[in-house]
Image (cartoon, grey):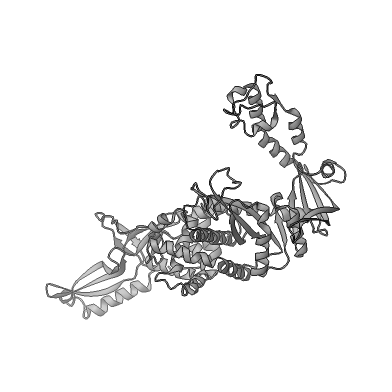
Amino acid sequence: MMVKWYIMASLKIGKSGGREYLSIVSGYWDPINKRSRTKTIESLGYLDSLKEQYDDPIAHFQKVVDELNKNLVKEELFVKLNKSSQLSDELNNLKNLGYFALSAIYHELGLDLLFRNRARSFKVDYSINDIMKLLVFSRILDPNSKKHTYENKDRYFETTDFTLENVYRCLSHVASLKEVVEEHLYKKSKKLYDRKSEVVYYDVTNYYFEIDDEDKLRKKGVSKEHRNSPIVQMGLFMDSQGIPISYRLFEGNTHDSKTLIPMASSIYKDLGIKRTIVVADKGLNTADNIAYNIVSKNGYVYSQTVRGADKELKNYVLNDKNYKTIDDGFKIKSRIVPKEIAVTNKDNKRTKVTIEQKQVAIYSLKYALKAKKDRQLIVDKAQQLVNNPSQYNKATSYGAAKYVKNLVYDKDTGEILTSKQKPIFDTEKLNEDEKYDGYYLIVTNELDKSDEEILKIYKGLWQIEESFRITKSDLKARPVYLSRQERINAHFLTCFIALYIIRILQQRLNNKHSVAKIAESLNLTTYTFLEQNIYVGNYCDDITKDLKEIMGIDLTYKYMTLGEIKNIAAQTKKGSIRKDLDH
């Protein structure tokens, strides 16, 4: 079996049976025995016989070899593949090269230097940088347990001279670098990518643990996934480009609204961020948070519930007067009003203060139809419950019960009792809820900004929700199986760095692809060891083509030598990538 390949050749003089012979060979690295070896391309014959044809056989064939090497692009040499060769369990034949794109961002951000410099104070006999690269790259490409990640470390062309125990010990050290890493990443990325912080987005989510008992950090609270397991709360700040700024873990029973002030104080003090407009959902819209924004001379843009508003505000929102139609099925209006809020003072007492607030009311037919569609399942269930109450109990009637009157449950069994009064569908409640379909409200202290500007600022909030989805689904940040608090902290720091890198990569690729698609593509971009130093590529798509055109990382070759692969790897570690690869 033959495969064509451009390969460097050399002239070899050997001995056999006391006679010297000449051959053209190529050198390659033996990955099993971990040493250099040679492969014979062509046997030329014994030297004494060749002297009968050539005055100086060595000089003659050296010129042949030189000419071959000089014209590599034009000439083809043949590599013999032995069909009887056996696979070895000591060799990982499949190598991932997609991680080179992640490596480029990792080194652009100077994380390698940061971890190397900080590791000196820990006085460890393993490379913290090598371990962090493995954890971060695998968190994006193959998110799994630390043990699984370690066992699959040889899929990358990276140094992995460390043990699984080293990995766990590394986590304990890295946990102490959280603030250092955040500051480094923010300042470095701001310089490299011209990050904007005039508008920042904030949200809170939680992550569950597969444990029964609570501890100092992991406590039972309001789970976003309706689980009864202990959780931790995470607050996250993100910029308008979708790149994270800072995160913080809170005890699982901490209310969302109590996390914003300590988080905001941190980014202003530790990262040196100046005035911002903080954008958040209605769960963060509290008097204390509003007052903090105003006192710290920052702006805020918060959503506010319409259904839970006072009667006067509801009437203002539902009244068609002064609405301006922007598009078909979309209208907007606003007003500036004095608003009285109750703020917690230094003595932990509530004090009423009056502020000026702009209230932006919006109606979207698209949202109205979506709300109706989302509710229909609950309405259908409620009607089924009314028609067949014996098929439901207190647990299974959850959700639908809001649209049913006269529901009485047996205290012991939870069974629905119908002996005295039968359940009735609550049409009034349904009509009341339907009144607010499509309406939503945004409040702000940015009084001079137009309604359209406020709406545009608020719409960016979806990106932070997507970031949480990415960390939970694509990066599989939960459930968390670590038990020591410092290792838990390090796990989330790893996820934070991974989110940072994949978001920047997404931006570098002109936001053409989703994070999930990028991660999938990079994970599939593998090369299989063929023979000698030769690897054959297995995958190519629009993302690998964009990596070549935009970032100069060319992983579209069908065949590459180990030397060429190492050359690309080395280029990614220099913080800049060549747009062409001599082949």
**Residue 392 vertical position relative to residue 327 in the rendered view, above or below:** above
- Classify the position of the C terminus by image quarter: bottom left
Tell me if 488 is positioned left or right of 437 in this view. left
Q: Residue at x 31, y 64 (%)?
A: 31
Question: Residue 224 placed where, x, y %?
Answer: 60, 46
Residue 36 occupies quadrant: bottom left
Q: Residue at x 65, y 54 (%)?
A: 203
Front residue of 499/489: it is 489
Q: Residue furthest left?
A: 17
**Residue 240 vertical position relative to residue 403 in the rendered view, above or below:** below
Residue 54 occupies quadrant: bottom left
Q: Residue at x 45, y 56 (%)?
A: 525
Could you tell me if residue 461 is visible in this image? no
Tell me if 574 is positioned left or right of 50 in this view. right
Total number of numbered labels?
A: 0
Q: Residue furthest front?
A: 347
Tell me if 419 is positioned left or right of 427 in this view. left
Question: Residue 233 placed where, x, y %?
Answer: 59, 53
Front residue of 574/489: it is 489
Residue 453 occupies quadrant: bottom right
Question: Residue 579 placed where, x, y %?
Answer: 52, 68
Front residue of 422/104: it is 422
Tell me if 16 is positioned left or right of 106 in this view. left
Q: Residue furthest top?
A: 419
